[in-house]
Image: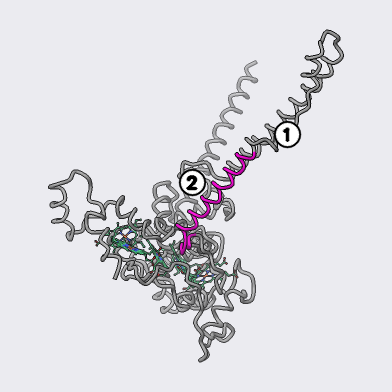
Amino acid sequence: MITNNLSIRKATRLILSASFFLLVIFFSYTSQAQESDGIPTDESVVSAGESLFKGNCAQCHDIHEVVIGPALKDVHERRPKEWLLKWVKNSQKVIASGDEYAVALFNEYNKNVMPSYPFSDEQVTSLLAYIKVESTKEPVKAEVAAAGDAAGVAAADDSIPSSYLTAIFVVLIVVLILILVVLGLIISVLRKYLNESSELNEEDVEVVNQKFDLFGLLQSNAFIGLVIFLFTAIVLKTLIDGAFTIGVQQGYMPTQPIAFSHELHAGQYEIDCNYCHTGVRKAKSANIPSPNICMNCHSGIKNVGGASGVSPEIAKIYAAIDYNPETGEYGNNPKPIEWVRVHNLPDLAYFNHSQHVKVGGLECQTCHGPVEEMEVVYQYSTLTMGWCINCHRETDVNTKGNEYYTNLVELHEEHSKEPMKVEDIGGLECSKCHY
Ligand code: HEC
Ligand code: HEC
Ligand code: HEC
Ligand code: HEC
Ligand code: HEC
Ligand code: HEC
């Protein structure tokens, strides 16, 4: 008994001290793992890093894929933190200092210059924290993200997507046909049953065996009258709609000389509209970008998804500016890319982008629709006078922080409780829109 007790006590003590020892090792190991690279993984730091990354880096970097710059997966293991701090603040300085790794990287990426960022050490650390956490995740498939987006848009719309409507419609038709078939079966069974039972008189037999006279129905006056009425109604409606849409090009979607996709550039890679349409905030015209702007990226990106060689669509950019991607030299025979104009108001109307986008604070999508989802751009709105006027009647003037409007707003508030609309500042005057 006693010896037994003793050995049990010894064993427990042994087990306890062993587990304590293991725990100590475990904790010292994990805390070391967190501290050794000096990059924390707290949620608040990571989410700060995420928004910095999306706002500043995402157009050139992905975690798992090469975009314009390298994939950043595990970059905190490739480079020491000190180096990364210096690099993000001023990569050109690191390259100029002769750092071997930096020079090699710069050459590998066709001497594309990464911008400098005036970030604090803390901010860069939060960026690295985000990259570190993302590095441990599996890459998200683009399709999944796109599907999620589409679902998000549909939900935000608060309406039933048209594909659902079609499905519901088809189901309804199938159910109707099934009901008809069942009814037909019931009729024939009933008829058989009644014919076999002997208690029917002449008249009932006639009713029971009555045939459905389709031909007679088709020839009846009521039916012919109905058909004529429907036909004239449809013709009239088409004519009237046609008359109102003469010259309206809504939905116009010409094929462009280069298969340039807004869905890819503005959607997937989130390149800002202003980056290419440089006039949109400061001039009447939004501008179509010159090939120089394409070359900021496409001197480096020669194809999609890291394939080798030059893709045929990108070769068209090089052909237009007479650029040789092998030697990096320009010839002297450039030809303009002949983009086909999609939106085109008649000369008699005046429309100014900066007035609407910068002063009015309107989103491009209000007038151009979800361009960032368009593989090929199309005309989303009607661009008729009625369209301009309607919006001027309904839209409040964006007066916030605009001193120009201070007096006008005071005057307006003296005689109206409604917010000031565009029509109140002369948005319906013929001469504002017509030369
Ligand atoms: C205009 C495109 C561009 C933007 C924006 C950009 N980078 Fe870069 N980055 C590059 C390129 C290109 C390289 C490759 C080196 C070179 O060519 O200078 C690079 C290299 C890097 C590297 C080194 C990668 C390695 O494999 O060693 C890091 C780290 C990095 N970038 C972080 C960032 C962070 C963080 C941001 C945002 C604050 C950012 N970059 C924004 C283009 C960009
Ligand atoms: C990488 C450059 C680039 C970016 C970013 C970009 N666009 Fe474009 N955009 C073009 C080019 C090139 C064309 C002419 C070819 C075409 O119609 O597809 C164009 C055409 C258009 C047109 C039709 C112009 C016409 O002919 O009437 C509209 C509208 C437009 N873009 C809106 C947008 C909006 C809105 C965004 C931001 C969500 C955007 N673009 C982002 C390059 C760009
Ligand atoms: C800010 C960077 C940037 C600019 C500016 C830019 N692109 Fe791109 N472009 C990309 C990226 C990133 C891809 C996709 C590469 C990938 O998926 O591997 C791409 C892909 C393409 C493709 C698809 C190539 C193929 O083989 O299908 C075409 C075509 C294209 N761009 C044309 C243009 C044109 C034309 C312009 C100028 C109006 C332009 N791009 C401006 C970044 C840019
Ligand atoms: C209030 C409506 C409205 C808004 C907001 C708007 N546009 Fe437009 N956009 C138009 C109209 C109308 C035209 C046709 C102009 C013409 O033919 O003179 C046009 C034409 C264009 C064109 C063809 C080239 C040109 O300048 O005529 C591009 C590109 C374009 N818009 C891009 C943009 C971008 C990018 C934004 C957002 C930053 C934007 N638009 C915001 C109404 C709008
Ligand atoms: C989505 C709404 C919207 C549409 C569509 C729209 N506008 Fe406007 N428009 C505005 C707003 C908002 C302002 C006021 C901007 C400001 O604060 O000066 C404005 C102002 C103007 C002005 C200056 C009016 C003034 O008294 O200073 C003109 C001119 C104009 N729009 C022309 C047009 C034309 C032409 C079209 C159609 C091709 C059009 N707009 C379509 C919203 C719209
Ligand atoms: C907010 C801007 C705006 C205002 C205000 C405006 N218009 Fe227009 N108007 C347009 C636009 C844009 C078109 C071209 C529409 C099209 O091509 O379908 C147009 C077209 C017209 C046309 C048709 C020309 C043709 O060839 O079909 C006439 C006529 C016209 N306007 C007269 C007027 C008169 C008169 C007034 C003042 C009572 C007026 N407009 C006020 C924007 C405006």
- Which numbered disc covers residue 66? none
Q: Which residues are magenta?
A: 224-250
Residue 218 position within the rendered picture, expressed as x and y whole percent measured from the top left:
70, 37
Residue at numbered disc 1: 216
- Is the residue under label 2 in contact with that under label 1 (CB below 8 Å)? no
What amino acid type is highlighted by mark number 1? Gly
- Residue, x 59% and y 74% (percent of image)? 313
Alpha carbon of mark 1 to alpha carbon of mark 2: how far? 95 Å
- Residue, x 72% and y 31% (percent of image)? 178
- Residue, x 60% and y 66% (percent of image)? 305
What amino acid type is highlighted by mark number 2? Ser
For label 1, the SS is helix
Residue at numbered disc 2: 28
Of tags 1 and 2, the one toward the viewer is 1
Front residue (pair 174, 80): 174
Q: Earlier in the sequence, mark 1 or mark 2?
A: 2
Residue 369 position within the rendered picture, expressed as x and y whole percent measured from the top left:
45, 57
